[in-house]
Image (cartoon, coloured by chain):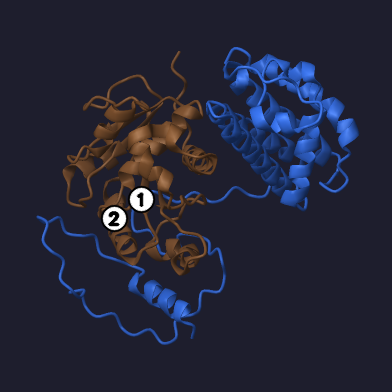
């Protein structure tokens, strides 16, 4: 057995499946070895090969029931779930937009949008490659007309893209970050809803829709 | 009543105070007004927020107008401060690192949480200080079931920027750290419906 496997097996064993509630005491130094009854040596504990075991296999003796994971969405619900995902990520990008440093802004914004695309891909069961998603994001952002982004810009990324708009104050940044996430989310929802994948994403048509969605997003969050 | 989240572990050093402050900050940045209630007599969180002012500190009686209340607790399972905090919480988060000592302690903490968290409350493990590509990080996947609570999917890494945060606050954090915290905050918030927004 590899040393590391041995270590993990020992760790697993040391965590008994059921522990009695600790009796409240004044703090005392814990004895070197566990004073409770010695654990019986389990014959060949089944190796835990599955990576993600469903949680809470130990019976919960009391109170809080662990909520079941939601059932897989049927197609009519999926679009609604997808919109929920976008809304959740809008909150994230609004927060990230508060970062004053341009380079950090860019990474944070794209990270959130990448995460959004990852989760939408998962929801629609579409194969996801980070490389492809990043390429699509870059081309979408590059394509947005300088007018849409002129009043709110995200620093270094735009500087490196051809035809980028001018760099303006950070005051309008949070709105743009949210508008971009909104636009990314809805462009992808539409693409995935019509059966598209990351590989057949047509950026030329998408860019036009994207620009409209960014403007729409900015309208919605201008006063937030 | 604000959505109340208790951060606990019977053992010190797992990252309760660090994550209490940083998660509260993350919630604020994500648009959910959060305050921190410092129930640890060590008062590290209070000192931290005195230094940086990132998050409002809730008064001792927990009153105030915020949607979320995060309670930092002492590293003592027998403390009534911990028990009281749990009994008024909707969510309990046991912070643990992948180290065996913290894991043993978190298992003991599960029992205390079950004793005091009201019925209908949600409890989760949050793996903190996880270093990628280490043996213990690899083992983390199987440990939640062993310990007896489901774990949040987000894991917080061991980052130097978290060490800088008590001095510089949120601005000490790089983008990756912030995203990690924002994701954890989002995951926690999705456990229970937030209270209706105050007008």
Question: In the rendered view, does A46 fall on the left or right side of A116?
Answer: left
Residue B95 percent coordinates (x, y): 36, 51
Q: On what subunit does the disc labeled 1 rest?
A: B
Image quarter for residue A223?
top right
Q: Quadrant of residue A28?
A: bottom left
Q: Colour of chain B?
A: brown
Q: Position of residue A8 (x, y in %)?
A: 43, 74
SS state under label 2: helix
Q: Residue B118: tell me if it is visible.
A: no
Q: Residues within 10 Å of mark 2 (few under 14, many from 20)?
A: many
> Which of the two residues, A52 or B193, is positioned nearer the viewer here?
A52
Task: Judge from the rendering whether residue A65 lies leftward or rightward of residue A142; answer left or right.
Answer: left
Q: Chain of mark 2?
A: B
Which residue is label 2 attached to? B109
Image quarter in which the N terminus of chain B is found: top left
Q: What residue appears at the point 78 percent right and 48 percent down from the top-left corner? A: A132
Whether residue A131 appears in this view of the structure is yes
The mark tally for this picture is 2
Asked if the residue at tag 2 contacts the one at tag 1, i.e. Cβ–Cβ closer than 8 Å, the answer is yes
């Amino acid at each position: 057995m590899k040393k590391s496997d041995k270590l993990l097996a020992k760790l697993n064993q040391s965590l008994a499946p059921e522990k009695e509630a600790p009796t409240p005491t004044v703090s005392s130094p814990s004895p070197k070895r566990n004073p409770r009854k010695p654990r019986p040596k389990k014959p060949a504990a089944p190796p835990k090969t599955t990576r993600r075991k469903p949680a809470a296999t130990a019976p919960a003796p009391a109170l809080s029931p662990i909520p079941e994971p939601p059932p897989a969405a049927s197609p009519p619900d999926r679009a609604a779930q997808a919109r929920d995902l976008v809304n959740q990520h809008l909150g994230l990008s609004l927060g990230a937009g508060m970062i004053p440093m341009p380079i950090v802004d860019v990474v944070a914004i794209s990270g959130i949008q990448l995460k959004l695309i990852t989760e939408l891909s998962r929801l629609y069961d579409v194969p996801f490659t980070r490389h492809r998603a990043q390429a699509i994001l870059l081309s979408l952002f590059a394509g947005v007309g300088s007018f849409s982004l002129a009043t709110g810009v995200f620093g270094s990324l735009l500087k490196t893209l051809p035809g980028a708009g001018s760099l303006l104050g950070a005051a309008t940044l949070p709105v743009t970050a949210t508008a971009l996430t909104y636009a990314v989310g809805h462009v992808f929802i539409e693409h995935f809803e019509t059966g598209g994948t990351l590989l057949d994403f047509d950026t030329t048509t998408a860019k036009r829709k994207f620009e409209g969605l960014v403007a729409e997003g900015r309208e919605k969050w201008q006063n937030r | 009543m604000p959505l109340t989240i208790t951060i606990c572990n019977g053992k010190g050093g797992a990252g309760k105070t660090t994550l209490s402050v940083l998660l509260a900050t993350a919630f604020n940045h994500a648009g959910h007004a959060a305050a921190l209630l410092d129930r640890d007599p060590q008062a590290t969180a209070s000192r931290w927020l005195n230094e940086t002012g990132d998050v409002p500190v809730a008064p001792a009686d927990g009153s105030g107008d915020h949607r979320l209340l995060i309670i930092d607790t002492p590293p003592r399972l027998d403390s009534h401060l911990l028990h009281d905090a749990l009994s008024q919480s909707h969510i309990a988060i046991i912070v643990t690192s992948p180290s065996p000592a913290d894991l043993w302690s978190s298992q003991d903490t599960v029992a205390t949480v079950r004793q005091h968290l009201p019925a209908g409350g949600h409890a989760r493990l949050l793996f903190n200080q996880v270093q990628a590509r280490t043996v213990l990080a690899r083992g983390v996947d199987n440990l939640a079931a062993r310990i007896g609570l489901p774990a949040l999917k987000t894991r917080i890494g061991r980052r130097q920027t978290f060490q800088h945060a008590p001095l510089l606050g949120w601005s000490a954090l790089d983008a990756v750290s912030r995203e990690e915290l924002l994701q954890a905050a989002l995951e926690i918030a999705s456990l229970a419906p937030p209270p209706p927004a105050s007008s």
